[in-house]
Image: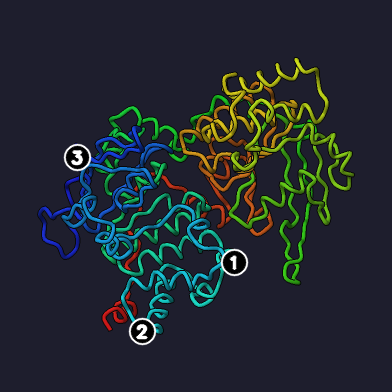
Amino acid sequence: MAPQDGLSASPTRAGILPGPTPPLLRVDGLSVSYGPHEVVTDVGFELRRGESLALIGESGSGKSTIARSVLRLLPHGGRATGRVEFNGQDVLGLSERRFRPLRGRAIGFVPQDPGNALNPVRTIGAQAEEAAALLDQPDTALRKRLILETFAQVGLDTPQRVYDAYPYQLSGGMLQRVLIGLAILPRPALLVADEPTSALDVTIQKRILDLLSQLRRDLDISLLLITHDLAIAAERADSLVVLKDGVVQETGSTALVFSAPASAYARKLHADVPALNPDRYADLRGTGFRRLQAGLRETPKIAVTAVTKTFTVDGKALTAVDGVTFTVPAGTTRALVGESGSGKTTTVRLLLGIEQPDSGDIRIAGEPITGRSHASLRAVRRHLQLVYQNPFTSLDPTWKVESLVREPLDRFGIGTRRERAERVRVALADVGLGEHLLARRPDALSGGQRQRVAIARSLILKPDVIVLDEPTSALDVSVQADIVEVLLALQAKLGLTYLFVSHDLALVRQLAHAVSIMHRGRIVEQGAVSDIFDNPQHAYTAALLAAVPSGLARPAPQSRSWPALNAARTA
């Protein structure tokens, strides 16, 4: 397939005369197969020096396979055909020995998960020295100086501490900055970033994306960005390639594809982005709003009053939850929002009785949770269920779907064998799954199917309250949209009460009726979703809202000078 016209034009850049320039990266007719199975078919696009291009699509669309073809990092058994030209040279035709000098030096790579990309038993500095070896700089003191300067330039405030630290001692945002620093250290011409912010809080995500935009501007690096989020792609890329099942659905300038998507698949991706469609589920949420207005005098299903919890860490007292108070009326959803470390998870553990508060009171449907024995809590938990963040780790991989969903009935001794089997089928039907999945194990299900199984499992006891702990953060936006619709439909049908824990404010606006914003263990602002989103009163809330991707192009970050690094490189 010939490269699309919409990806061929290059905007005039400072210091460059107008006119066509040869592409830094040109992909033409790329197909990738594993044995007889073709996973990428006839893909083509161009990326010029200093520009950015986003590959977007759901899991399985071929995004990462294309990126790994460019990097010559396909898993064993993968075969790429077609042409992948870097600086005019077809890299697919090169031997590994001839391509290896390009990988890392000329083509950098930022992987998705820093937890897996970095060796947990080696210091950051030891791993950074491997990247610095690509500089061919024999002076060890100068290599370390370059590493520390690069760490500072990617926003790590204490470079020496980071250099000496092990990965577990740094936050997810810091680890992602480390990976970006290691990738740009040799000054590559092309940076391939594979979902570099998918596991990060929204404010950290913005900082990482701002950093990538700044590096592209200041160092004239071309960026190949892989993402499933159309709003992020629209903000950060000059051009888009929309993929589905390994086939290009649409290509062109970001403004054109975003404002007027031509393909049905691109339109679906657009519709599934929460930030772009805040009122998508207004009708389903209306049931909860009506219940909220009609039942103001009813006992709330969840009541948390002045709860405090302190832990001792390295001999110092750390207040994880500080005077937290909120209520959730029956049949409604309250979102608990905040970044990592804000106290959300500790609040949930207190609510579930896993931890006991130092002070305060927690009640479910008027029944106290605090100070109860494990045996008495077991009865409460029948009406209070939890849906975990990652269904692949929360579901036993050796069990079949039928056993996974039925287990709570077995534990509580509810019903006959035939009645249990029928309730399993009903629970699966409620979340949109068929009986043909009963004999499958989790590894034979998609991410969305696994999460639906987890929801069915939580519903099987017919609980009043469900705590949803980041239930869609590991899912593509299209799968996420399906899960949100299932949750809201079940709430409207069964009158369920949800506590929805999330750092995604765009999703919260679609799903919740009320929201509590947590920061450093305290609730800094709470109220109706519309009030908080339309008129935030606290600076932290405003900062969270400002970080939500809107699909509108952001102004380029202010240029920073890199004199120390430049001087050291030319020394």
Which is more N-terminal, label 2 or label 3? 3
Q: Quadrant of residue 184?
A: bottom left
Could you say which disc has been placed on residue 169 in the image? 1
The answer to whether residue 277 is above or below residue 88 is above
Q: Label 2: which residue? A: 139
Residue assigned mark 3: 4
- Gap between marks 1 and 2, in whole Å? 28 Å
Residue closer to the observer: 536 or 551: 551
Can the viewer see residue 111 in this picture?
A: yes
Q: Earlier in the sequence, mark 3 or mark 1?
A: 3
- The C terminus - image quarter: bottom left
Q: Quadrant of residue 438?
A: top right
Secondary structure, mark 3, is loop
Residue at the image point whose x is 64% and y is 56% from the top: 342
Tell me the quarter of the image containing the N terminus: top left
Label 1 crowd bin: few (<14), some (14–19), many (20+), radius 10 Å: some
Disc 3 residue type (three-letter): Gln
Q: Position of residue 367 (x, y in %)?
A: 85, 37
